[in-house]
Amino acid sequence: MIQSIIYSFFAALFFSFLFNVPKRSILVTASIAGVGYAVFILISNNLGIELVGYFFGTFIMAILSEIAARIMKMATTTFITIAVIPLVPGLGLYKTMEYLVKNDYSAAIQTGTNAMLAAGTIAMAIAVNTLLVKLYIHFSNNIKI
Amino acid sequence: MFHFIISLIGGIVTAFIAICATQIFKYGNIELIISGAIMPLLPGLAMTNAIRDSMRGDLVSGVTRGTEAIIVAIALAIGVMIILKSWLLLGGGLSL
């Protein structure tokens, strides 16, 4: 588990070099990726359901990105776009292709459904977090004591 | 150029280099090499933006982004699939 966290930390680090983000946000982005991946591993190992792990891992990443964006006065997407990359199911998509090539259609549909659900869950977690933050800002601005 | 052509060529080059390298060096796993190498090409950002736009109410923008993401992913899959299928038809194996 420690190994996976370190690997995802360095994956996010080098992806942030690839995407040309500002230099002072690189270490923060990599740390967010490591923490989110740790949450993903903990939840999906203890509950046995991978989708819940994907949701809460990405959700923690999004919350941390919002906090970091407020502190460092940068855009939220700078952090969350790169931090979520180690979670994207690339192996599932490849497995789907491999089963399709080998004419094993039932295994291909099973793997492909899992991969598409995982990608949708990640996107949904980010969108839900954005909506919650917008809602919080809206209500905290409108209620005057 | 179009996103479709770019992703297609990306998938083809990725699979070709992975198979050549594992055949030359006799070491490594084709699955892990390809699935790691297509990570920068996968449309994760476009998919996220699509769902975020849809939930905010910009339905046309969301559908446009979502279609683009799906087409890019399919092009990538087709590119990798061409090389893998030809390699299997030539008599090669996917694992050493």
Image (spheres, rainbow, N blue to C red):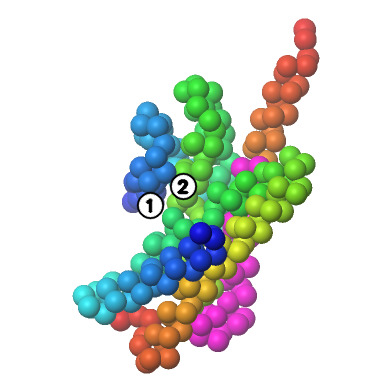
Label 1 marks a residue whose chain is A
- Say whether residue A124 is magenta: yes
Structural crowding at the residue carrying mark 1, measured as other residues with C-alpha within 10 Å and reported as few (<14), some (14–19) or many (≥20): some
Task: Report if residue A46 is visible in the image.
Answer: no
Q: Residue at x 62, y 75 (%)?
A: A109
Q: Position of residue A145 (x, y in %)?
A: 77, 7
Residue furthest out toward the top: A145
Label 2 environment density (alpha carbons within 10 Å; few <14, some 14–19, many ≥20): many
Check disc 2 and report the residue beneath it. Answer: A37
Judge left or right: residue A14 versus residue A116: left
Task: Looking at the image, tell me whether mark 1 or mark 2 is earlier in sequence order.
Answer: 1
- Expressed as whole percent of the image width and height from the top left, the position of residue A90 reads 48, 62
Dot 1 and dot 2 residues touching (CB under 8 Å): yes
> Which amino acid type is marked by label 2?
Tyr
Does residue B70 sit above or below A122 in this rendering?
A: below
Residue plotted at (60% across, 57% down): B69
Magenta residues span A99-127
CA–CA distance in space, label 1 to label 2: 8 Å
In terms of image quadrants, where is residue A13? top left
Mark 2 belongs to chain: A
Secondary structure of the residue carrying numbered label 1 = helix
Identity of the residue furthest to the left in this view: B25
